[in-house]
Amino acid sequence: MLGDHLLRFAGFELDQQRAELRGADGTPIKLRPKTFEMLRLFAASGGRVLSKQELMEAVWPNVHVGEDSLFQCIRELRTALGDERRQLIKLASGGGYLLATEVLAGPEPGPVQAERTATDPTGEVAPLPPVEVAAVRPQRAWFGLSRQATVAAVAGLCVIVMGLAVAAPALKPDLLFKRTPPRLAVMPIVDDSKDARGAAMAAEVTARLTDGFARIQNISVVAPRLAAKGGDGTGAPAASSDYELRGELERRDRSWTLRARIIKAATGEVQSVIAASVAAEEMDAQLAQSRLVAGVGHGLARRLNEILEARVPRAPVAGASAGGDKVAVEQALASINQTTRERFGAAQAMLQKALSDYPDNLDIAVALASLQMRGIQMVWFSPEEAVAVEAKANATLEQALRSKPNSIAVLEAYCRFLSATNHFVESLVTCAKALSFDPWNGSALYLIGLGQVYLGRFDDALATFLQADRYDTPQASRWTWLLGAGMTYALMGRYEEALPWLQRSIAITPGTGRSHFLLGAAYQRTGRLEEARAAIAEGLKLRPGTTRQSVSPPMKNASPVCVEAWERVVQAEVDAGLPEQ
């Protein structure tokens, strides 16, 4: 076990004394406390495999948590380390995890060599080719330069700095220095419940909101100065905060309701108000807290993202719609809450009309591209139409990313584009960035889970879909992660567990067809043959002409593990009555 306070691995520094992870350039990388503790355990383990139970008992002592909390920390670590290919945090044989790289301890810097490993199809750990190192290990500046070249470079930098100092009075400050992230103070949620459990519930909700907003990369969360006991218990604002999050927890009849708002600290102007409710008796306290926090956190995070994006100076957009774009987008999205071909067509027509009225409005164009990517995923375009739609969407989204690289709506749309066009590794990266601005984004989690499915990472995918279900935001997309969980269970051969997820998804959105085919496979493999045939028949009504050759989604870039699993599911569908040709 390594006891030094500074640990180095794969170009990163883990400062145990300051509880900080730093990249190769010394920049701190934001981690939640639980995620940092898990990374510390990995770094101090000496390369030993840590079991899931061992990790959960160490990170959450004396607290019962499900494996979804563990998987969430693993996902956050891989994102922070740029480990999308899972070359650092490895799933080992037997289900445990290890940090697959050499860890050096001590105050003096030294070369760090990544011990590169991979998992073969049997789950055993095996070496990776050397060519893969660059994808995981950031490069350090100045390494490899001669002494003379280093001196010259430093001298040149000094000249630049002196020149900037002379020119500073004529330049705007934010041209010289990066703008300081806005500060958000999460105030203690007020317990207005008149329930014995209310105070504990309000405190836990406050903590979860604080943790969630602390994960958003372009803001800093500051702790409030708590008011003295006695008053209203709401606490005093933290010094110099730009925004405050305040809210109240109520208990009415059979439900808990959380109301929260973001307030501009300098003026008291309310920027956004969101409310979320959950049934008090139908779920355990942990799930209720998760859904309350996600219900308000999702909406407030998106609104905060809009506010911060509006602060970034950009060239004016011709044809601005003075709010018309927002109305058109919201109406279009509302029309496809239950996705059918007809609703999809109505939403597409609505956005195309809005775009013809405001042809230079990027927000409408992005919404249309995102909607059409959903149409491609649902196979509602002919092959020829799909090619044209993809090309136009790609151009639109590349322009949007240049203009609004931190916009949740743009990142979501591009993530969906990458997923719909089978660029699964790239989609994981883009969706993870969307989550870095809205940690409760169920749509982004669904697309991450979908990418994990096609990459053959079924355990990760299932954990992602279950996390999306735990958040349940936005509820209009609920059927997608229900379908995702049912599909993953089926691909894993766990058909009995797949049934309730597929049934719940179809109850919300019955018009997709693919859900019925999967349900037919699950019924077939669990011996419910009549129900299997009925489900396949319903799927053929929705997607006439579907056969063994056309029932599977496109498999370009899919892993062999995924392809083989789909073949087994398709065989079950054929056994249940799906035509061979």
Image (cartoon, rainbow, N blue to C red):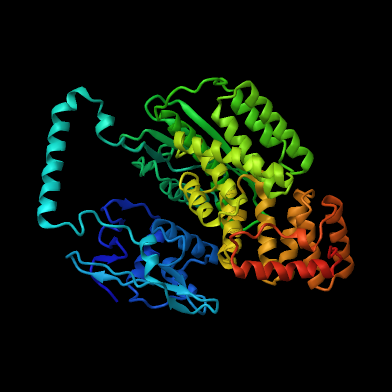
Residue 147, quarter of picture: bottom left
Q: Left or right? Give the position of 531 relative to 32.
A: right
User: Which residue is at the front of the view, 504 or 383?
Assistant: 383
Residue at (85, 63) in percent of width and height: 579
| Quadrant location of the C terminus in the rendered image | bottom right
Q: Position of residue 466 (x, y in %)?
A: 61, 59
In the image, residue 215 sits, relative to residue 408, either above or below, namely below
Task: Please identify the quarter of the rendering in which residue 333 is found.
Answer: top right
Q: Is residue 364 left or right of residue 113?
A: right
**Spot occupied by residue 357 in the image (x, y as percentages of width and height):** 64, 21
- Quadrant location of residue 563? bottom right
Question: Residue 306: percent from the left, percent from the top?
Answer: 49, 33
Q: Is residue 66 at least partly visible in the picture?
A: no
Could you tell me which residue is drawn at 73 percent across and 39 percent down? Answer: 344
Q: Residue furthest front?
A: 384
Residue situated in front as seen by the camera: 366 or 185 = 366
Q: Residue at x 54, y 37 (%)?
A: 395
The vertical placement of 367 against 129, above or below, is above
Q: Position of residue 216 (x, y in %)?
A: 43, 45
Quadrant of the image containing the N terminus:
bottom left
Rendered view: 493 above or below 225:
below
Report the label total: 0
Relative to 65, say whether 337 is above or below. above
Name the residue: 35% across, 44% down: 223
Of residues 200 and 487, the one nearer the viewer is: 487
